[in-house]
Amino acid sequence: MLSRLTRPAANAAARLAKSVRKVSTTQIGGYEVFDHSYDAVVIGAGGAGLRAAAGLVGHGLKTACITKVFPTRSHTVAAQGGINGALANMTEDDWRWHAYDTVKGADWLGDQDAIQHMCRLAPEVILELESFGLPFSRTPEGKIYQRAFGGQSLKFGKGGQAYRCAAAADRTGHAILHTLYGMALKFDCLFFVEYFAMDLIMSSHCSASEGVKRRVVAASRRTSGDDGKCLGCVAMCMEDGSIHRFGAHSTIIATGGFGRAYQSCTSAHTCTGDGSAMASRAGLPMQDLEFVQFHPTGIFPAGCLLTEGCRGEGGILRNSEGEPFMARYAPTAKDLASRDVVSRAMTLEIREGRGVGPNKDHIFLHLDHLPPETLAERLPGISETAKIFAGVDVTKEPAPVLPTVHYNMGGIPTNWKTQVVKDAEDTIVPGLFAAGEAGCASVHGANRLGANSLLDLVVFGRQAADTTAELVKPNSPPVVLPKNAGEASIARMDKMRHCSGPIPTAVLRRELQVTMQKYAPVYRNADDLAKGKEAVVEVMKKFKDVGVSDRTMIWNTDLIETLELENLINQAAQEMYAAEARKESRGAHAHENFPDRDDENWMKHTLSWLDKPHVEDAKVVLKYRRVIDQPLDKEMHHVPPAKRVY
Amino acid sequence: MILDALIKIKDEVDTTLTFRRSCREGICGSCAMNINGKNGLACLLYIEESSKPIEIQPLPHTYVVKDLVPDLTNFYNQYKSIEPWLKRKDVKGKNDKEYFQSREDRAKLDGMYECILCACCMTSCPSYWWNPEYYLGPAVLMQAYRWIADSRDQYTEERMVYRGERLAWVNDTMKLYRCHGIMNCTNCCPKGLDPAKAIVHLKEQVAETYTDGWKNMMTQEIVKNKGRESGMMPLGLLSFLEGMASQVCVFFLEGHVGIGLDLGRWRPSPVPFFTELPDQEQSCPPQELWRH
């Protein structure tokens, strides 16, 4: 049973394993390059990445999981509220009602086949997590406790509030990530911890920039480009600076979102859209990047998250007049309306002068009317967070909150099986998958319901593993990497390491964040978006003048942050262009000049490319792709578009 | 917060300053470091008004990779060794629901499942400093107890087998009994958890459930780990004689305990052996007061 006391560190294991062949290339400044070969490689070890890695090992595939932080530091750990699933522990429930709520929450931009898949599998994955030891909170009967959450209803919206968010107090993300990490340990997954993935290796006989141009042109001409298969990725070990090329028959990107493109966000410092930018540099499109979710209750001014579960347990938002104003904006759901509705309501209240505080610039979240025992049992984590970051005792006083950037609904476009698609015809990129926040299946469409993201991670992490197992046999022959694979990437990293431009990384990053916060906030308008486009182009051009002071190869966080900044700019530019182009209001994209939803012209996904891999000389190209409005099979009816009222 | 200061220094003064950070809200555990002599999370500690500079060091007694970045590989391996996942002998049927767990049983996990694996407690423990390869340390022992206390294997008759194995694994002079109740762990935990108490419970459970079968396993472990108690290697003939004497002594003692615990040195005790806590210059956020 407990026979393995100590295992060699991942680095040592990698060097000893037979799959490693040391190759040194002296062409690019003499970097030491190690080649690895696996059946599957997972980039990212958050909820989706760990579930995918564990699933792959469970299927018998030789798997490597590359992560730039230790797995339990991934931002999944900060999720608080819960994971949705029609377990029917509190009331009668049906996954079709959950699917309906999700389609409506997505403002009909979600792909109904993926939504059906996710909601149908929800009870099974939650029970699977519980069987690995997840310490869910419990009902008096001993069943998994489920709380009310935003946008959840019974009987297709007609049966009142649904209680389907399975929770572990208000630390569900923490519990899920630690449980998944335990699961990964049980399955003996091989981790490459603190390896920064730099670029994908695609099968193309030309250099990266040529390949991008060909692919974008090919996509727009509706012909299939070159082979375009993903062969693996290139990563840099942060501990010693060595470069590693991972050849794999299946590469799964699970690197999360890019919340750090904004000045104020609930996201961690590590949320910089690395995997998505890697796919973008490989000539692949991003989908629906303009849809950025503003979580209604981020602590003001720190930005730390207060879960929607606060409102689920009975918390109420009040303005300076003490009025529970959500009753005006969402008569049925009130404070538990969908997040974009609540954020817009709060923004309007502040605009109309009813904000609280000396500058009337935020709103109060009241939990003081709830019994202290409830707060201690169900919301202990946020009680502590409010105390530390806002100096507030939530049993006695309200907490100051403001809508804060929280989640990216958009990402790498995939089908419901998590296979990446590269154009409007749904042409699959062989060997590449995306799951979690980095992917866009699209289950969240224009707006995500709370507690659906943790579900998205586990369902699509598992699906990525299952789809890979269908396509890849265990112990497949090693992938043959092109001889110069990763050369462009190494050259770029080397250039960044030695760049000595006048603009420090932190200054340029700040400029990007201020630009995004100013020109693409909760409410957007044509003027601001046009100015925002110009400002973002400025930032893109300035990237060539960025300067890095740290020249070492050992734990060079200056270099890493600069590479992350490039990824942020890559994603933010596409977001700004996509937002400016979408002339309607849908879900989280609220356009003041076009306040209504326009299904006739705009019920479609945005696809965006950068026409060159490097941001300093790239331009954004936009195309569109249809929404999949039919479910997978007969078990669920198609949900026809309707007016979205809560 | 202190983390904000570090980030400002990195951004504006010296970009080569290196430290781990991620969530900045005290839930990921990346930014654990030693601030004014006490371990804690930089993102949760306020910058106090003071005429003296704030002294920031990496976590004590760790291999430092660079600046404030320690190597925690040993800690992660030890965490893996206690097998932190639910273990059951039965297999769930396809249509089976969740394992039922009463609210009282679930409440037993409170105060343990919240551990963020930041390693503040591990690297504040002098016992762990002297024996990091053998002593499991407070965080790992608390997680070992978290799985032992989880009632969800209560529904199999073989419960005691797995519980017993988990307990037998830690029941070892070097793994569990290097804890002498120094209490630095509880003192510095940034989440307000109490590893020392969990270790006391662990020792109690070991005492309750010990069976003879453990004795062999344990005796072998003791012999294997002889001489490492102090962590210091005395020199020459004296040490050889000392070693012989202590071996005989201990063997004799151990051989007659039967329940694996003697009532002398390794008595489980909620009272710390050191009753004085070191002077705290760095004040801590309010959750310090929530501990009993």
Image: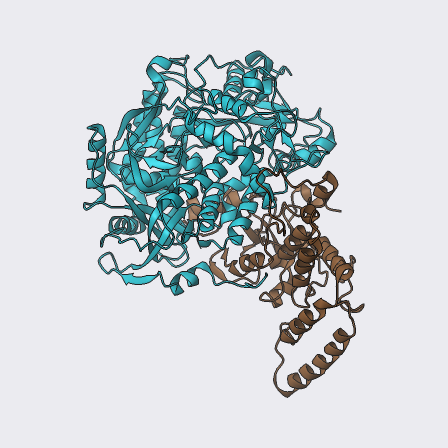
Which chain is tinted brown?
B
Q: Is residue B190 above or below residue A508?
A: below
Q: Is residue A559 visible?
A: no
The image position of residue A153, as x and y in percent, is 57, 20
Residue B186 is left or right of residue A77, and the answer is: right
The image position of residue A488, as x and y in percent, is 25, 48
Q: Is residue A65 above or below residue A571?
A: below
Towards the viewer: B42 or A108: A108
Extreme bottom residue here?
B237
Total number of numbered discs in the rendering: 0
Where residue A566 sits, quadrant-wise, is top left
Q: Is residue A403 above or below residue B289?
A: above
Q: Is residue B100 visible?
A: yes
| Quadrant where the C terminus of chain A is found in the figure | top right
User: What's the residue at 55%, 13% (across, down)?
Assistant: A329
The image position of residue A166, as x and y in percent, is 60, 33
Q: Is residue B25 above or below residue B232?
A: above
Residue A601 is left or right of residue A263, and the answer is: left
Towards the viewer: A171 or B257: B257
Which chain is tinted cyan?
A
Where residue A278 sits, quadrant-wise, is top left
Where residue B177 sits, quadrant-wise, is bottom right
Towards the viewer: B124 or B47: B124
Residue A245 is left or right of residue A54, and the answer is: left
| Quadrant where the N terminus of chain A is found in the figure | bottom right
Residue A174 is left or right of residue B260, and the answer is: left
User: What's the residue at 74%, 33% (across, down)?
Assistant: A373
The image position of residue A481, as x and y in percent, is 26, 53
- Colour convention of the picture: by chain
